[in-house]
Image: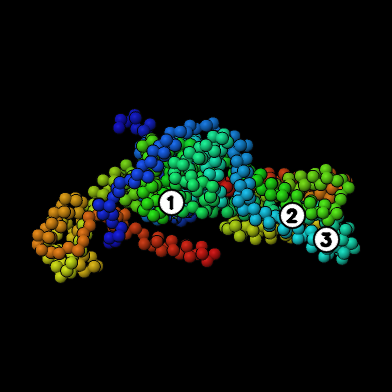
Amino acid sequence: MNPDGIGTTTTTGAPPAAGSKLEAEAIRKALSATERPPRASAASAALSFGWRGMLKVKHVPEQLLDVTITPVMFVLLFTYLFGGAIAGSTGEYRDYIMPGVLVIAVLFTTVYSGIAINTDLTKGVIDRFRTLPIWSPSPLVGSLLGDCVRYLVAATVIVVLGLILGFRPDAGLPGILAAVAVVILFSFGLSWVFTTMGLVMRSPNAVMNAGFMTIFPLTFLSNVYVDPDTLPAGLEAFVNANPISHLVSASRGLMEGNVESENLIVALGTAALFTAIFAPLTNRLYRRS
Amino acid sequence: MSENGNRKTLAIEASGLAKSFGETRAVDGVDLAVRTGTVYGVLGPNGAGKTTTIRMLSTLLLPDAGSARVLGYDVEREPDEVRGVVSLTGQLASVDEDLTGRENLILLGRLYGLKRDRAKARAAELLEAFGLADAAGRLVKTYSGGMRRRLDISASLVITPQVLFLDEPTTGLDPRSRNQVWDIIRTLVDGGTTILLCTQYLEEADQLADGIAVIDHGRVIAEGTPGQLKASVGSGALHVRLLDPDDRPRAEAVLQRNLDSVHREHDPAALSASCSDAERGAEAVAALSAEGIGIADFSLGQPSLDEVFLALTGRPPDEAEGEGQTDTDDRQEAA
Ligand SMILES: Nc1ncnc2c1ncn2[C@@H]1O[C@H](COP(=O)(O)OP(=O)(O)O)[C@@H](O)[C@H]1O
Ligand SMILES: [Mg+2]
């Protein structure tokens, strides 16, 4: 038997210190003070979770480095290192690649939505959220709304850098803004895929690896970097079918003022499809896990 | 309690609650009846099924079998209504470590439907009451274990819940923080909240609970008030350590005249005997002195959870489980 486990009768029920008496009084008062308000609306709950996402960025602004540095490196690398070789001149290649870099910069960010959800799942706070009397998908919708702000940051960095480097698309600022809007809508849809991954995979690292292993090839096998006409036939077919190619074409078209509606439809249709499939799936997995 | 009043006075009722994870029967037919305004202790070792039970009662897990009601609402069919009346302070910290204490409470206030100003005021009120005002603006991950627990409990009180689930609220806390948490729990019950308290410590259940269910391997193996439970276990023990080990045989004979099941401990100078009554224990010690046997120290203790388990199940609480635990931890570190 273990004598350490035995509480002697003399040590139980130590008298509370004066400090804790006071505390008890304050707690009693704090308890009687609340009345249950009407439930938060779905929108208000989702926005509160969006606010939570923003606070995390506020506390650890470094997490935006990923979102900003990678795309900056892409722009500089491709424009100055490969531009001359691929397109004959840096300026020409910059104009070709900018709308595509906008797309990849923002799409890479969507992987973090899955990582964030996976990280949340390993913490107890998610249990508290799930026992609140709120619209049940609001933590998910809210965090994706928060993520949209990150997408906007990534997009802004690219656009500003492009403008500094002399990128002046024909459709001007309205064209750029329209392209950014379409890219963010697409990303919102795509991020549901990664939240689903985030809920089925075992660690944030696994989500990161799987996420980037999906998104890397898909962006490289698109028309971001090169004109698909220059590719072998099989690859060309794949690249042309890739929804990311359509998104890139839509982004280029909007910036240049000659967008083809087919590209817009495929890009936004894909986003809607992802949302229709993966949002309910995410929600189901989230409620169950 | 009259028969027709019974229904109303029960805050939590569960019958035949069961949940398996693969081959593991985590909860295997648990019945509970918790009266409104009381603290009910669910006492059991690691892996007994406490957390799983709480998760089913708080709508986080669907039971495989059985049913449960919280304030009359069915946890399976009316989860939203249940969520409207309960709060949960889980075993893992159920606050967001990457936010400050204040932000955590404001967020919850907003989610409960408080207006922005009201949520801020409420957060300030709670932080003050729980002695966290100075740390309000710090990230929770910088908090000590005791502060975290207090924040966690205050987070459950943003809107005063009618039923509060507390899962091992003092595990890992130093004695001072533990006493603070106990004081908080007592205050809450005075205020009329019903509390379901999961714990591994008999002393905790004894200090706080009006009723206790001892669970092991997903089953309730004993139930009653703390007094009944301890009595059924044969209650406490008297431990005596002698100045001179050579006196032990004589001391043993003296104790046998006064108490039951006297036995020699590993320590060659120590003896213990079962003893449910402080007075008889004192008499036994006095008898030793009267015989001129020198006593180094003695203690009269409540049975530990180990002893309760030994008495109820004939074996100490799951040594195997403890080893399994370390295995898991190792694996997590290796991963
Ligand atoms: N999500 C889960 N998946 C698989 N096994 C689980 C899961 N949750 C709990 N268990 C198992 O169920 C049993 C009861 O666990 P739990 O309810 O956490 O016990 P306690 O809270 O009393 O320590 C343990 O054997 C545990 O390993
Ligand atoms: Mg547990």
Q: Could you say which quadrant of the image residue B325 lies in? A: bottom left
Residue B253 position within the rendered picture, expressed as x and y whole percent measured from the top left: 12, 63
- Residue type (three-letter) at the residue carrying disc 2: Ala
Q: For the point 50% across and 48% down, which residue is it? A: B135
Q: Residue furthest left?
A: B291
Q: Residues within 10 Å of mark 2 (few under 14, many from 20)?
A: many
Q: Residues within 10 Å of mark 3 (few under 14, many from 20)?
A: many
Mark 3 → mark 2, Cα distance in angstroms: 15 Å
Of tags 3 and 2, which is closer to the observer?
Answer: 3
On the same chain: label 3 and label 1? no
Q: Which mark is residue A54?
A: none
On the same chain: label 2 and label 1? no
On the same chain: label 3 and label 2? yes
Quick check: B221 left or right of A30? left
Of tags 3 and 1, which is closer to the observer?
Answer: 1
State whether residue A118 appears in this view: yes
Q: Which residue is mark 2?
A: A105
Q: Is mark 3 within 8 Å of ligand 1?
A: no
Q: Which residue is mark 1?
A: B146
A66 vs B41: above or below: below
Residue B26 position within the rendered picture, expressed as x and y whole percent measured from the top left: 43, 52
Q: For the point 79% across and 58% down, which residue is it? A: A75
Residue B52 position within the rendered picture, expressed as x and y whole percent measured from the top left: 44, 49
Question: Which of A230 and A164 lies nearest the eye of the viewer?
Answer: A164
B194 vs A214: above or below: above
Q: Which residue is mark 3?
A: A79
- Residue type (three-letter) at the residue carrying disc 1: Gly
Q: Is disc 3 placed on a helix, strand or loop?
A: helix
Q: For the point 11% across and 58% down, which residue is it? A: B287
Q: For the point 56% across and 48% down, which residue is it? A: B99
State whether residue B303 appears in this view: no
Q: Residues within 10 Å of mark 1 (few under 14, many from 20)?
A: many
